[in-house]
Image (spheres, helix red, strand yellow):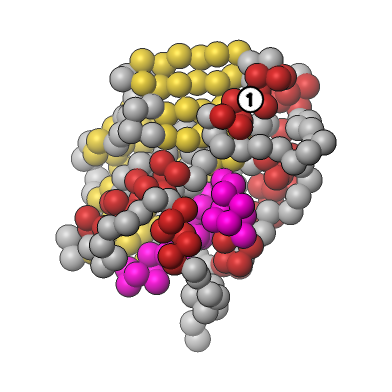
Amino acid sequence: MQPPTQDSEPLDLDAYLARIGYRGALAPTREVLGALHTAHVYSIPFENLDVLLGRPIRIDLASLQAKLVRARRGGYCFEQNTLFVAALRRIGFKVTTLIARVWFQRSEIGPRTHMLSLVELPEGPFLADVGFGGPGLTQPIRLVEGESQPQAHDVVGLRREGALWMLESRAREPWQDLYAFTLEEHFPVDYEVANHYTSTHPSSLFMSNVLASLSSPEARMTLRNRQLGILRDGQFERFELGDDELLDVLKNRFGLELPAGARLRCAGLDG
């Protein structure tokens, strides 16, 4: 018996493509996959504002279209990748959804809380991930070990330890681990459990920090609480923001505006 998927839920593909500014071909090819992936990453910011505003993070397709497409908001991995995978499947790509354990900026083992996907193409399998934020993928990468694969602002690669794959990134620093995963297929119910942890557990990174990220062909911007980082031409700049500047940066650099009267409160801002 096949586990249930969200494929039966209606997807307004035209509205999604307009949201990411994509007007190219629609066929399950490597070129189309790359173009869609980059268009998504450049258009929809990674962000966790609803978590800090006490709003539930819903990852059913109807809710994702209402938030990320019609309301032109962003989201984190479960939101972004669920929407992206739905679009890929509608176009005709064969996609397996996976889950990873994040190691980026961690020294201790944490739970598996990151969604990504594996896309089967005639050229071989490719990893696609539009929802990591920060040093995440701007282009899909081949599932091969030990090959440096360039991205818009850094280089990534995969190493393998038995059944476990580790995604690594190198920008200004030496290689650093991003996340580890296996090729076991996961399903919507698995992501519901992980999403509940990331959006509600006191130990979750998303409960205690303002986080946002958005890439463009020219630069990658990352925001963590009051620190804005910009990576451009291999050079990294960091800026400390005041309260008024924070809201301005969210609105004008990431396209994110808080509802009238809403305030962001978390340990990362208050500490």
Q: Residue at x 76, y 50 (%)?
A: 55
Q: Residue at x 38, y 27 (%)?
A: 219
Residue 260 placement (x, y as % from top left): 78, 38
Residue 252 placement (x, y as % from top left): 56, 29
Against 214, is 201 above or below?
A: below
**In the picture, which quadrant includes the C terminus?**
top right
Q: Which residues are magenta?
A: 66-94
* Residue 180 can be seen in this image: no
**Is residue 237 in the magenta section?**
no
| 224 vs 110, nearest the viewer | 224
Q: Residue at x 36, y 15 (%)?
A: 235
Horizontal side, residue 113 vs residue 50: left or right: left
Horizontal side, residue 232 vs residue 267: left or right: left
**Is residue 91 in the magenta section?**
yes
Q: Residue at x 41, y 58 (%)?
A: 17
Q: Judge the density around disc 1: few (<14), some (14-19), many (≥20) Cα neighbours within 10 Å.
A: some
Horizontal side, residue 170 vs residue 41: left or right: left
Against 147, is 1 above or below?
A: below
Q: Secondary structure at mark 1?
A: helix
Q: Main secondary structure of the magenta part?
A: helix
Horizontal side, residue 244 vs residue 136: left or right: right
| 91 vs 154, nearest the viewer | 91
In the rendered image, which residue does mark 1 sit on?
A: 248
Residue 185 placement (x, y as % from top left): 44, 66
* Residue 265 can be seen in this image: yes
Q: Which residue reaches farthest right?
A: 261
Task: Give the residue type that dot 1 points to.
Answer: Asp
Q: Quadrant of residue 118?
A: bottom left
Against 96, is 179 above or below?
A: above
Residue 223 placement (x, y as % from top left): 56, 27
| 115 vs 75, nearest the viewer | 75
Against 107, is 143 above or below?
A: below
